[in-house]
Amino acid sequence: MPNALLPPLLEQNFADIRAASAGFHSYTAPGTVHTILTRPELYSVQLNGVRLRDWVANLAAGRPVENVSPAKAK
């Protein structure tokens, strides 16, 4: 399956999960790294003006967060 097909499929999967679980939130960073939380990129990735580090901190603190993805890039 070409990589170009992955973002819309991922977005549809997230929409399905959100429909079943209102508390589900996602931040999909651009690039090829699969797990970013343990990597230095956690502190440098930013998408749509939202730094991943700040998004994770807000989520962990129970503050509201927006879902972030390249498909919703401004």
Image: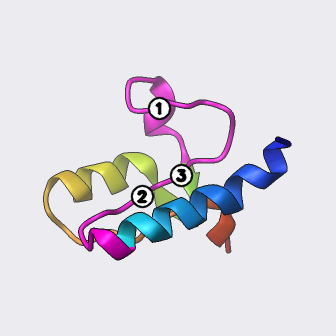
Furthest-left residue in this view: 61
Task: Tell me the element at label 2.
Answer: loop
Q: CA distance from mark 2 to mark 1?
A: 13 Å
Q: What residue is shown at x 38% (from left), y 24% (from top)? A: 38
The verdict on residue 54 being magenta is no
- Name above or below for residue 67 compared with residue 35: below
| Label 3–label 1 contact, CB within 8 A | no
Which mark is first along the chain, 1 or 2?
2
Q: Which residues are magenta?
A: 19-45
Residue kind at label 2, given as amino acid type: Ser
**Quarter-wise, where is residue 67 in the image?**
bottom left
Camera-side residue of 69 and 2 = 2
**Residue type highlighted by circle 1:** Ile
Mark 2–mark 3 Cα distance, whole angstroms, equals: 6 Å
The label nearer to you, 2 versus 1, is 2
| Residue marked by disc 3 | 28
